Amino acid sequence: MNGQAEAPEATEGDSPFHAGEREAQRLAGVDARIEKVGRAAIRDHLLPQHQEFFARQHQLLLATIDAHARPWVAMVAGPPGFARALDARRLRVDAQPLAGAPDHALSAGGAIAVLGIDYASRRRNRLNGRILGSDASGFEIAVQQSFGNCPKYIQTRATRLPAGASWRLSAQAGEALGHCDDQVRTLIAEADHFYIATHYDRDGDRAHHGADVSHRGGRPGFVRVDADDALLFPDFAGNRFYNTLGNILANGKAALLFTDFSSGSLLSMTGTASIDWRDASEHGFAGGERLLRFVPQELWRYPRALPFEWSFGEQSPALEATGRWADIDSGGG
């Protein structure tokens, strides 16, 4: 591969959390307990079951960083086996993000994160690392952090590849959007999930520099688009690591990816994010421990990018006690 980079060595004994994550944990009142949990749960290698998990997936979500130090969420897809562990510390992915803007800059040494989700079982695993090298057919990652996530807030879905279709994403060029048009607003209003990417790049703490990508699920209507195109959504209880919130506290940057399962289109955006730490008794969103506000600065739409068909299974039981913005607007709480 072009531009090979050395896999970084993990320093044993270091906290798995950077200053931003630790501050988020402190604000949430879980810092002492979660530090101990994180040291046990976050590994610097892929367990055998995680290696097998990634090899079974036909799509992955990536967090990448562009030349302007902005995060993006990208999706890559291929037949099962297109992602495979070369060993416990290296993952090979035989696919590239969609061509054109945004520039996902998969260059050697760059930060990257990977999220795999089995939508049938709600099982999901994440890894963060560095790009060892990239070529025309794919790229390799040096694993720095690897951990599983709970199945909360994931709706079950089944995928099917139509006869004669390829597992690869469409090569069709993306469309730059100047604002959230009616089509975008409808997609977001009907979404029951999205993916969010963030990263940490604080000077003086290079050991913790890296990217992160995660899943956010809710009942349709859990994301609101305001008149100024800002998106507002709740943060539900999770693993308490606060990777996303910690990165946002550190640099205020984030990226979102929405999928339109009916048309196969993708909606990608990068921008700034902030956190409202008030609890549900003050902001009124049932189940939301806090609110996040995202202001898009660049948006891209990829029509009919997904080659496979999706069928909805069931809503996550964890969402039964959560709200929607329509409930608040109507006074329903």
Image: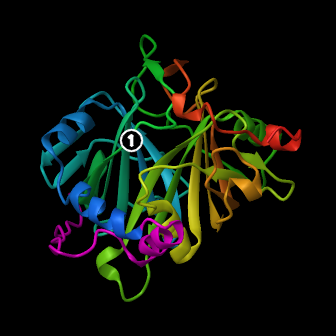
Q: Which residue occupies the foreground of this view, 240 or 68?
A: 240
Q: Is residue 28 magenta?
A: yes
Residue 295 lies left or right of residue 93; in this view the side is right
Q: Residue at x 75, y 58 (%)?
A: 282
Q: Residue at x 44, y 16 (%)?
A: 160
**Magenta residues, as a range?**
1-30
Task: Return the residue at label 1.
Answer: 150
Residue 230 shows in this picture:
no
Residue 46 lies left or right of residue 100; in this view the side is left
Q: Give the tally of numbered discs.
A: 1
Q: Amino acid at mark 1?
A: Cys
In the rendering, at what x and y percent does residue 125 appear?
Answer: 32, 43
In the rendering, at what x and y percent does residue 152 appear?
Answer: 47, 38
In the rendering, at what x and y percent does residue 262 appear?
Answer: 63, 23
Please state, as top left, top right, bottom left or bottom right, where the C terminus lies in the image: top right
Residue 246 shows in this picture:
yes
Snapshot quadrant of residue 119 = top left
Q: Residues within 10 Å of mark 1 (few under 14, many from 20)?
A: few
In this figure, which colouring scheme has been used for the structure? Answer: rainbow
Q: Which residue occupies the foreground of this view, 249 or 31?
A: 31
In the rendering, at what x and y percent does residue 69 appear?
Answer: 50, 72
Residue furthest to the bottom = 204
**For numbered disc 1, what is the local secondary structure?**
loop
Q: Which residue occupies the foreground of this view, 36 or 222?
A: 36
Q: Is residue 167 above or below residue 236?
A: above
Q: Is residue 78 magenta?
A: no
Q: Residue at x 33, y 75 (%)?
A: 208
Residue 110 lies left or right of residue 283; in this view the side is left
